[in-house]
């Protein structure tokens, strides 16, 4: 994949001074602040590759609070990452995690991943692709990589994480990878939960969250619906996922710290899709812009 193409000169012309944030006043009876809602930027990859600053600004204007960059960010120089961080600060967005290949969490790749994530302000380096993984021994090696990465990241105030797809929840010859990874990695390794892929695999998302208390620190709110022309093309809360139960379990039992909308495609253009998903999320949660 080519990464997010944008010259430094054109980038800098779009980035101004950082905006000052405002703090919420504390109060003894103040309602618990809702968890931040963000966007996995893979959802708008067609726009991001053409115009990163413009896309980030558009996402912020919609009302998203968090973004998650995916693996091409590892092609950035530290200087470019600092430009991106200035942009995020200006539009009041936070990058709390990134998606990475397996190689980025192996010893040879972790150093650069740490450097770029620290610049961006991200605290979680998530493995979003295990590479070749067919046998129990393959998954054992992945668990070892995550454990070793966590040992390196913990003293830095950072976390290693793993992001599931359908594969990890599918049982084959009596073996299901995701429970194996959970059982063979320390609790400090985040199990970033892609809800829609578990739904497609027929795995109960609420049961998974409740079986792993405190480890579901972030979730990809990808919906899924059975039937023709549905699948992952449904918008958030248009599919079959029991979202109210999922979000309640994530907050009360899973240890969720933030949520991320993710969409692989829909009947609308990508930016409109992201905006509509956010609107649906707000309706479900009874919140306003």
Image: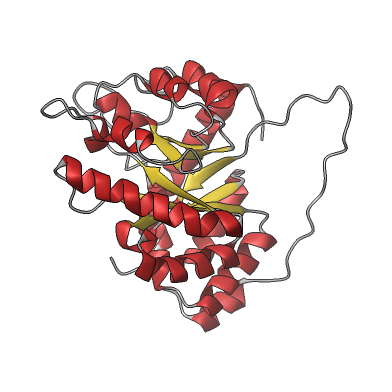
Q: At 37% across and 43% down in the image, what residue appears?
A: 163
Place of residue 117 in the rendered image (x, y in percent of width and height, measured from the top left):
53, 63
Tell whether 139 sits left or right of 208: left
* Res 186 seen here: yes
Place of residue 146 in the rendered image (x, y in percent of width and height, measured from the top left):
38, 50
Residue nearest the viewer, comparing 196 with 28: 28
Colour setup of the view? secondary structure
Q: At 40% across and 50% down in the image, what residue appears?
A: 147
Q: At 50% across and 65% down in the image, what residue appears?
A: 114
Which quadrant of the rendered structure holds the C terminus?
Answer: top right
Tell whether 207 sits left or right of 173: right
Which quadrant of the rendered structure holds the N terminus?
Answer: bottom left
Tell whether 172 sits left or right of 59: left
Q: How many marks?
A: 0
Tell whether 227 sits left or right of 60: left
Place of residue 184 in the rendered image (x, y in percent of width and height, measured from the top left):
35, 38
Residue 147 higher or lower than 71, as above or below: above
Residue nearest the viewer, comparing 3 with 128: 128
* Res 50 seen here: no
- In this view, the residue farthest toward the bottom is 9
Place of residue 269 in the rendered image (x, y in percent of width and height, measured from the top left):
37, 46
Q: At 32% across and 43% down in the image, what residue appears?
A: 264
Residue 109 higher or lower than 65, as above or below: below
- In this view, the residue farthest toward the left is 173
Residue 76 higher or lower than 208, as above or below: below
């Amino acid at each position: 994949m080519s990464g997010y193409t944008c010259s430094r000169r054109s980038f800098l012309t779009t980035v101004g001074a950082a905006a000052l944030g405002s703090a919420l006043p504390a109060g003894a009876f103040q309602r618990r602040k809702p968890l931040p809602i963000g966007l996995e930027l893979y959802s708008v990859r067609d726009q991001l590759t053409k115009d990163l600053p413009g896309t980030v600004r558009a996402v912020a204007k919609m009302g998203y609070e968090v973004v998650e960059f995916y693996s091409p960010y590892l092609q950035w120089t530290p200087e470019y990452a600092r430009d991106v961080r200035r942009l995020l600060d200006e539009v009041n967005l936070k990058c709390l995690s990134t998606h990475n290949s397996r190689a980025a969490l192996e010893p040879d790749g972790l150093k650069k991943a740490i450097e770029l994530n620290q610049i961006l302000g991200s605290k979680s380096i998530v493995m979003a692709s295990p590479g070749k993984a067919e046998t129990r021994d393959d998954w054992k090696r992945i668990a070892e990589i995550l454990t070793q990465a966590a040992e390196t990241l913990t003293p830095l105030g950072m976390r290693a994480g793993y992001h599931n797809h359908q594969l990890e929840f599918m049982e084959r010859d009596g073996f299901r990878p995701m429970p194996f990874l959970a059982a063979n990695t320390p609790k400090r390794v985040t199990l970033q939960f892609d809800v829609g892929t578990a739904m497609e695999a027929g795995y109960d998302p609420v049961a998974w969250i409740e079986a792993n208390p405190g480890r579901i620190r972030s979730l990809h709110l990808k919906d899924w619906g059975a039937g023709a022309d549905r699948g992952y093309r449904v918008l958030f809360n248009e599919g079959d996922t029991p979202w109210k139960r999922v979000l309640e379990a994530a907050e009360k039992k899973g240890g969720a710290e933030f949520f991320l909308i993710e969409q692989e495609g829909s009947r609308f253009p990508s930016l409109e899709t992201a905006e509509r998903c956010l609107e649906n999320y707000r309706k479900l949660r009874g919140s306003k812009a």
